[in-house]
Image (cartoon, rainbow, N blue to C red):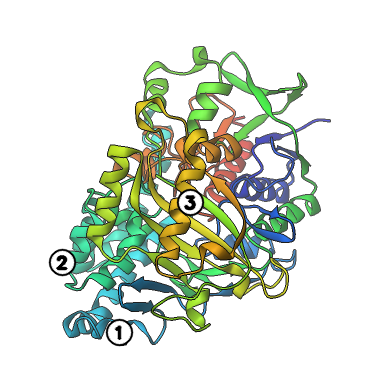
Amino acid sequence: MARDVILIGGGHNGLTCAAYLAAAGLKVTVLERRAVVGGAAVTEEFHPGFRNSTASYTVSLLNPKVIRDLDLARHGLKVVERRMANFLPLDGDGFCVGDGLTQAETARFSARDAERLPTYWSRLEAVADVLRELVLVTPPNLVEDGWAQAAPDLLKSVAIGRRLTRLDLTAKRDLLALLAQSVGDWLDGWFESDPIKAAYGFDGVVGAYASPYTPGSAYVLLHHVFGEVNGKKGAWGNAIGGMGAITEAMAACCRARGVEVRTGTAVAEVRTVKGRATGVVTEAGEVLAARAVVSNLHPQLLFRTLVDPGVQPTDFAERIGRYRSGSGTFRMNLALSELPRFTVRPERGDHHTAGIIVAPSLAYMERAFHDARANGWSQAPIVEMLIPSTLDDTLAPPGAHVASLFCQHVAPELPDGRSWDDCRDEVADLMIATVDAHAPGFAQSVLGRQILSPLDLERTFGLVAGDIMHGRLSLDQLFSARPVLGAGDYRTPIRGLYQCGAGTHPGGGVTGAPGHNAAAEILKDFRRRRI
């Protein structure tokens, strides 16, 4: 079979890239190591009769253009919005965030904060709109290849500059603050009460192994607010059938466009001849040739395990080696006999459809981070719980439920040489007890559990150091510098080898944007006969 492209890794960005390439007439083969496509966006049975999103667990950042272009609705995707955005059980009280709720809820703690909320929303949205425009833009990649090569990137830089000049001075100042400040400093400048700062501050540490007072964490908040659900900006929702419904729809689109999708096919080597990628060798020893190879893997997995170091520029290889990962994440799926009854809100209600956040203040989040750094995990952890079966009855038997627990902070590597294989159950018990403290009886309702430590996330899904973002969203690892400066346009120093994963712009989350953007650049090179 004559192939144009071999794509390594059948996660959502790989499938997105493959679908675009196939739509342009290229012959594409996707190779997935696991028995199922989807990467970290999969739905699997983890306890008899109970199915859930195994790793990634909620929808907002999936780009609407990708949804339209791949016709995901026709291929079975349906996303429903949460009926409440967030619920924070506090000591003796509860705090709700959602349409028509947030201001009144905030006013119970601070009239000043409630009054400031509309201005906060409008100013954050102004900056988020800029980010939305840049999500599907390939970053400029100015390199020392002469004016002919540099001219397109210079023009691209000018176009991006024009986007930014449309912001008024206030928005420009806000953008600078959100890129450089900590989320704690950003929110402390706006609000005085703990609950609203905790509700918004969680978005600044989710998936980031950092304190809310770590510089740059404000951008992590911004990264989590540029999405939408069914046209509603900033909303979060559930995919009916779990996150695997997204990648199943993508795979169906790929197959309809003629993509060959092979599961259970791990790649052992990217073949190169005279500095050019020519195909791959599978772990079974099969040699597959193609005009181009595209990797959906974490950048370090690609360059440190699959590509011959001898064909990599020295400085590039060194910087890939220093690329920083680790999101301090401990992921669990629980089979529940019943819904939790929170002390502050024991009745069944919309709060059960929300992101339920156990983290009452920024100070609590800061202690959780420093405790994890010192001891391996926090004894008072941050836990976000979603109960998707409240919106999707396909996941659990009648009357029962499934819960997703996204827990922080835990150290990607434990101190004193301990292994996560030895501590996994102890930490899982702690996470369940943390929820049980606010919902007595919760622990007794657990019928079964699936536990994914940072080590499990790396082994199962290729998330290096358990990093759900494929690399930290720090200023030195964003836009043109993701994964490293000079390789920010989805191309690599090796001709014919490309990247399309979350280790490229715009980063992590189930967006499809890196796959979309990489496909556009690959198609340019095919048209210009640069491959």
Compared across the picture, whether 466 is left or right of 218 comes to right
Chain-order first, disc 1 or disc 2: 1
73 or 273: nearer the eye? Answer: 73
Q: Which mark is residue 429?
A: 3
Q: Position of residue 51 (x, y in %)?
A: 69, 59
Q: Is residue 469 visible?
A: no
241 or 91: nearer the eye? Answer: 91
Compared across the picture, whether 524 is left or right of 132 comes to right
Q: Position of residue 428 (x, y in %)?
A: 49, 49
User: Looking at the image, do the residues carrying marks 2 and 3 touch, with CB atoms under 8 Å apart?
Assistant: no
Residue type, numbered disc 1? Gln
Tell me how far mark 2 sits from mark 3, CA to CA. 37 Å
Q: Which mark is residue 189?
A: 2
Is 105 located above or below residue 48 in the figure? below
Chain-order first, disc 2 or disc 3: 2
Tell me how far mark 3 sits from mark 1, CA to CA. 36 Å
What residue is shown with label 1? 103
Locate residue 485: give its quadrant.
Answer: top left
> In the image, which is nearer the foreground, mark 3 or mark 1?
3
Q: Position of residue 273 (x, y in %)?
A: 63, 15
Q: Position of residue 49 (x, y in %)?
A: 74, 61
421 or 52: nearer the eye? Answer: 421
At 59% from the left edge and 28% from the top edge, which residue is drawn? Answer: 496
Chain-order first, disc 3 or disc 1: 1
Locate residue 67: give its quadrant.
Answer: bottom right
Is 392 located above or below residue 527 in the figure? below
Question: Residue most toward the right?
Answer: 1
268 or 419: nearer the eye? Answer: 419
- The C terminus, quarter of image: top right
Circle 2 sits in a helix, a strand or a loop, which is it? loop
